[in-house]
Amino acid sequence: MDIKLIIIAVAIVSVIGAIAALILSVASKIFAVPVDEKAEAIRECLPGANCGACGFSGCDGYAAALSKGETDNTALCNPGGNEAAKAISEILGVEASTVKPMAAVVMCRGHNGNSVQKLNYQGVMSCRLASQVYGGPKECIYGCIGYGDCMKACEYGAIQICDGIARINPHICRACKKCVKTCPKGLIEMLPLEETQAAVLCKNHDKGAQTRKECSAGCIGCMKCVKSCEQGAITIDRFCAKVDYDKCIGCGKCHEECPVGAIDIISLIG
């Protein structure tokens, strides 16, 4: 092959490459997205869990909202805690909000000793998948299946499966709410760490007689807790007791009156 043709071909390719590079360089400047340095600084203060517990689309979304003034609440990041809130407030030049420490609690006592099995599930060990087979392997279709979807979702190792039911260590929990979103039964709730409150560890909405057949620790809607509560903090919703945490003072009277032990006094302090 003629050496001149080779040189011409190389030259043409080089020119085309140079032109393309120039076009890309100009385009990158024209279409460049302005960098929000304040948002980036705030983002560095956040733990990167991207859990959405703050109400925004992850850490980037929360940082952008703070930078743009869409929210001035620096205490929405539970995993970051007060340390992150203080760092963010310094960047924004505002007074730091206080993060209310929370921990997740599994509202169910249907462990293997209390609950009744209705079938021998053989399949993928997933609560979400198992719940699609007649509501799960336990007679109570509202209770914890115990296959660990929440445990797998927890990045902090705060959840363990004990005797067929999920249990959460409040001192390891970072209140990211990923377990709340993962539980197919909606059994996990957030409770304040610094308060003592009554909690109904049951979500069964069957009538009392049916609940007794399904789980010995299930709420039967007997109303004794309602009558014993002087604060009016307890009501019955579809045969299951429900606590208004804003009214509850943690006196323990409902716990004492509950004939099946479905109500416990939750103290996450210490």
Image: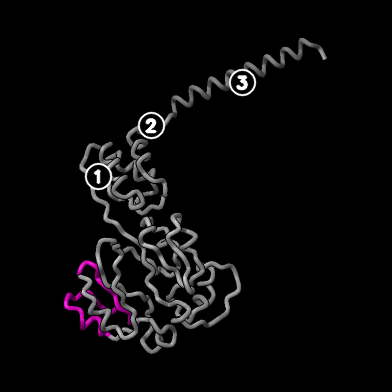
- Other residues around mark 2 within 10 Å, as few (<14) / some (14–19) / many (≥20): few
Residue 179 position by quadrant: bottom left
Residue position for label 3:
17
Question: Residue 118 in the image: x percent, y percent?
Answer: 52, 83
Q: Does dot 2 land on a helix, a strand or a loop?
A: loop
Disc 2 residue type (three-letter): Val
Disc 1 residue type (three-letter): Asp
Residue 208 position by quadrant: bottom left
Residue position for label 1:
72
| Gap in angstroms between the C-alphas marked 1 and 2 | 21 Å
Whether residue 173 is situated above or below residue 166 in the rendered picture: above
CB atoms of marks 1 and 3 within 8 Å:
no
Disc 3 residue type (three-letter): Gly
- Other residues around mark 3 within 10 Å, as few (<14) / some (14–19) / many (≥20): few
Tell me which numbered mark, 1 or 2, is placed earlier along the sequence. 2
Name, please, the residue furthest toward the top: 4
Tell me which numbered mark, 1 or 3, is placed earlier along the sequence. 3
Range of magenta residues: 223-248
Residue 35: assigned label: 2
| Viewer-proximal residue among 137 and 135 | 137
